[in-house]
Image: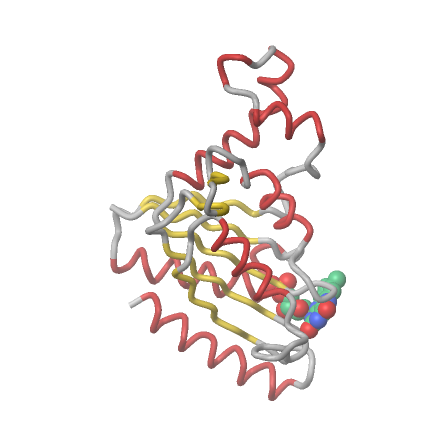
Amino acid sequence: MTTILQLNSSIYGEDGQSSRLADEFVSQWRDREPTLRLIRRDLAKSEIPHLSAQTFQAALTPKGDRSAAQAAQARLADELVDELLGADVLVLGLPMYNFGVPSVLKAWFDHVARAGTTFSYTENGPVGHLDGRKAYVFATRGGQYAGTSSDHQVPFVSQFLSFLGIEDIEFVYAEGLAISEETREAALRRAGIETTRLAA
Ligand SMILES: Cc1cc2nc3c(=O)[nH]c(=O)nc-3n(C[C@H](O)[C@H](O)[C@H](O)COP(=O)(O)O)c2cc1C
């Protein structure tokens, strides 16, 4: 049984184009594997705060050594890390906002990158603990950036996932959504076809 962790981060919730593609992908996967286990978070609605020094310190403190306050401070980060460690597949809805990833997704990144748990520092450099997992990323943009040096989003997401050990990443793009109705329709049609191909 596959466990999918799906993170949407559009400010438009289920109506976001990235959410629609990610939801469609998971729905088609479920048609193929009805028993799949899905953990779905809408990061724009859930309240993942910016990481604070207190939360960071509490999360790095071994569970048995935490004070009651630290246990409370680390609870959400622990939950997010456990969800990630328990997943076989990560699905990201990835809107582009102001040239980067949504700040809510960055906040999630900050909570799950935990030395000793999701990655380790070794004498040969950092090693991710999530090897063997696969990620599918549904990237939606008003403009067109894929494959150009102006795309700062995809290299960042790839580097972050790779840092955690997730090297097998598929990107589906729907670009040019703000350029014209024709560009938008064509991009969404192509992305839909690619989504179906990957879910098969
Ligand atoms: C606040 C905001 C900032 C945006 N910034 C960019 C941008 O920097 N580059 C771009 O190509 N599109 C930008 N867009 C357009 C979005 O990428 C596009 O609407 C996309 O569909 C967003 O994904 P979503 O529908 O899943 O929210 C922006 C949209 C919003 C609302």
User: Which residue is painted at 64% across and 49% down in the image?
Assistant: 106
178 is higher (above) or lower (below) than 159: below
Q: Quadrant of ligand 1?
A: bottom right
Task: Give x and y (percent) for residue 176.
Answer: 63, 80
Residue with the most extreme bottom position: 182
Q: Nearer the viewer, residue 190 or 131?
A: 131
> In the rendering, at what x and y percent does residue 177 appear?
63, 77
Q: Which quarter of the rendering shows the C terminus?
A: bottom left
Height in image: 65 above or below 60?
above
- Image point (41%, 75%), residue name: 194
Task: Using the image as rendered, state which of residue 95 and residue 67 is in the foreground.
Answer: 67
Q: Residue at x 59, y 38 (%)?
A: 111
Q: Position of residue 150 (x, y in %)?
A: 68, 75
| Residue 9 falls left or right of residue 122 | right
Which residue is outermost to the right? Answer: 98
Q: How is the image coloured?
A: secondary structure
Q: Is residue 16 visible?
A: no
> Quick check: can you spot residue 87?
yes
Residue at 53 percent of width and 85 percent of height: 186
